Amino acid sequence: MTTGGVEVWRGSVAAWECDHMGHMNVGFYVAKASEGLVGLAAELGMPHAFAPDASATLIVRDQHIRFLKEARPGAALHMTGGVVEVDEDTARLAFLMHHGDGAFAASFQTLVAHATPRDGRAFPWPERDPPPA
């Protein structure tokens, strides 16, 4: 991934996204990473990858999450993302979630398949879709 990646998501932590200890629930980290995936797909030339009439989509096959600093209600967050490597029909992507002060909140390493949206069958990237890793 190039240094810092590109910004793919920006938002904040809602009170209802937090557990009884006042920390953002794990499920909402994953939800925000999914929103970041939509943003990165657009940056990679697939702006309609998740539209109902898409001819190709990105399906998460594996994801490794590392929680680095808790996020509390009202916390401003943003996410950068980039391509780590590309194979024939998959790509390994990295996302970094940052607090407003720049501290890392979480990191995500996500393996996606370039696939058909109807049956999830992986197929090779067209020449235009992924940039060089």
Image (cartoon, rainbow, N blue to C red):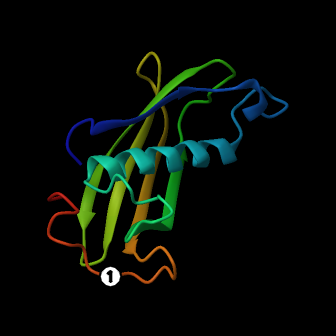
Lateral position of residue 122 relative to residue 29, left or right = left
Q: Which residue lies most toward the front here?
A: 53
Please name the residue shown 47% across and 18% down the image: 100
Lateral position of residue 130 relative to residue 100, left or right = left
Q: Residues within 10 Å of mark 1 (few under 14, many from 20)?
A: some
| Residue 127 on image: x %, y % | 14, 70
Above or below, 75 against 124 in this view is above
Above or below, 91 against 93 in this view is below
Q: 15 and 103: which one is in front?
A: 15
Please name the residue shown 38% across and 71% down the image: 55
Q: 128 and 83: which one is in front?
A: 128
Q: How many marks?
A: 1
| Residue 88 on image: x %, y % | 24, 78
Q: 102 and 52: which one is in front?
A: 52
Quarter where residue 70 is shown: top right
Q: Quadrant of the C terminus?
A: bottom left
| Residue 30 on image: x %, y % | 59, 49
The residue type indicated by label 1 comes to Phe
Lateral position of residue 15 relative to residue 4, left or right = right
Please name the residue shown 20% across and 43% down the image: 2
Give the structural element (helix, strand or loop) at label 1.
loop
Above or below, 30 against 105 in this view is below
Quarter where residue 113 is shown: bottom left
In the rendered image, which residue does mark 1 sit on? Answer: 123
Above or below, 42 against 78 in this view is below
Please name the residue shown 44% across and 84% down the image: 121
Q: Which residue lies most toward the right here?
A: 20
| Residue 64 on image: x %, y % | 50, 58
